[in-house]
Image (cartoon, rainbow, N blue to C red):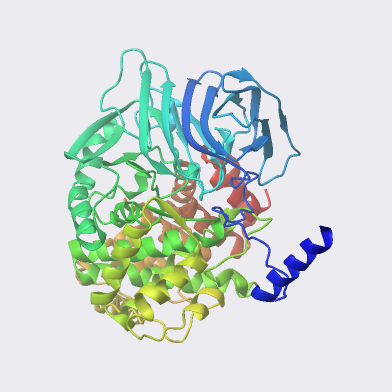
Amino acid sequence: MKNKLITIQCVLLLLVGCTNPKPETTNLKYVEEPHSHAQPNEAVITHLDLDIKVDFNQKIISGKASYDIEHNKATEIILDSKYLDIEKVEADGVATEFSLGSFDEQLGKPLKIAIKEETKKISVYYKTTDKTEALQWLNPQQTADKKHPFLLTQGQAILTRTWIPIQDSPQIRITYDATVSVPPALMAVMSAENPKQKTADGRYGFKMRQAISPYLIALAIGDIEYKAISSRTGVYAEKSMLDKVHDEFSDMEKMVAAAENLYGKYAWDQFDVIVLPPSFPFGGMENPRLTFATPTVIAGDKSLTSLIAHELAHSWSGNLVTNATWDDFWLNEGFTVYFEMRIMEALYGKDRADMLALIARQDLDEEIEGFKDTPNETKLKLDLKGRNPDDGMTSIAYDKGYLFLRTLEEQVGREKLDPFLKQYFEEHAFSTMNTERFIQYLDEHLLDKNQVEFNTDEWVYQPGIPANQSIIKSDKFDKVEQAIQQFIKNNKVNPAVTKGWTTQEWVHFVRNFPKDINKDQLKMLDEAFDLTHSSNSYVAMVWYEQTVTHDYHGNNVDTEVEKFLTSVGRRWYVSTIYKAFKKSGRTDEALAIYKKARPNYHSVTTNTIDELLGY
């Protein structure tokens, strides 16, 4: 019988070809993720039910995070945890074994939870600690109204694990419910369906019905109020700022409509913005349904509202179609800058959009110059393994990514690119995308289809900017540069030349002073335009950079620089000025200010400035 069986097997092998059969391959849903301990191909979370209490006296969040999970006979599920006090864990309501692995400075600890074949739900009872990086607790003096404390979270890139034990990878999308208990005088809001008024007991319930990545789970608590702009747009802010914010962002509904006209229906039902205290580390954060924004964009003339267009654009690129890993960050930000510019052009005209684009192009040149010794940092596709993903959040992802798409638009035409992008968002809605799959999709659905040759690989995988880049021009900026030349040449200012200038023109004006401009010339310009006391935070930032760089001390500017750095926590703004101090050999002065300012900054900002100044 044995010999007969061997004979039959040989005959079969001859029929199909006497080669070793290929081993079966497993089509894994999730790619390798260097910034998470989770093993989602083994066991993955699908829904979060969060029940927490917020204690402002102890500055602690405590409660329970429960998860629906999916797995294929796994014996454990791994969550990410950093600086959390894990009290106990349950599987389907029964206590189960758990362990915390070794600590990694970037990733925290893996939380390994024992599960059985039939396990459908896990619950983790925990508390935050004083090291929790995502949370910023503000005392009343750090708020606009100075009456009540405030709490805000910032989860991007991998900080959600510091206030919720979770599988903290962008490729893992979950829905969530939350119950949050806060002091009755305060209101809680999240990246979810939100209240419009305070409750009597300080207890708030939330639902996020669309699946989102964990970095987009956000919470803010303060003495805030809501004011609608339209049936699906509105703003939250402290009472003293509410009307200003409402006026500044009154075009939000128009922005949503313009975005929908470009790339399809807004998928998140509601688009609200909360303006936070000035310590918030970013210009904005695109948390679904509720964008978090810095008060530095409240200029009084809507001149900085491109930030709102940017965060809105993330509702498609980033929130709807999300970078699978932080190495693919350009898929979030490059697309969003491109979309932002298209929204701004639709609402405010091509001149405004081109000025914004040219400022971004100048930012890109400056970034590339800064990376001249590490050119691989200028690739769109990054390799951030073993590093903090914040290292990849540079102008490269934003502005080189934008330039890639703008150049592509010029080559194929908007009449082809727009339908392609709309199809891309529709076909990949509520999913994640990596660079390799995007390039394959681009080839198949745009380039090959239209017989277009484009050097995609050079743009994505090579450092620097390819020769076939789009050339961005602005007639308005040309006139600004002529004004600079005349002021310097004649050593005299004619204020009439600047009448009607936009914020973008003023920024271009200040940023493009001659490198050899002297203190007397800076004094002349300052006396003419009082740049030291500009009420526009963007203009003030670029002016303070110039004053530090050129050692100008007139018009009480040193006091104003310190006041700015100790009251504003927006990382881009403060790091620009601290860099100017360092480049000018004035690090000791910067450190003296930083020691005063540091308690007002979020950990996202302090991590950057600590490294910059060697604090």
| Front residue of 576 and 195 | 195
Q: How many marks?
A: 0
| Front residue of 111 and 252 | 111
Tell me the residue at 51%/74% (across/down): 460
Q: Position of residue 139 (x, y in %)?
A: 47, 27
Can the viewer see residue 266 in this picture?
yes
Tell me the residue at 42%/72% (across/down): 362
| Front residue of 64 and 144 | 64
Q: Is residue 232 left or right of residue 560?
A: left
| Residue 25 lies in quadrant | bottom right
Tell me the residue at 56%/36% (across/down): 166
Q: Is residue 296 left or right of residue 16?
A: left
Q: Is residue 169 above or below residue 148?
A: below
Q: Position of residue 343 (x, y in %)?
A: 25, 61
Tell me the residue at 55%/46% (across/down): 604
Q: Is residue 529 left or right of residue 116?
A: left
Q: Is residue 603 above or below residue 13?
A: above
Q: Is residue 430 left or right of residue 397?
A: left
Q: Position of residue 504 (x, y in %)?
A: 30, 65
| Front residue of 485 and 226 | 226
Q: Position of residue 196 (x, y in %)?
A: 25, 28
Q: Residue furthest right?
A: 3
Can the viewer see residue 520 in this picture?
no
Where the N terminus falls, by quadrant?
bottom right
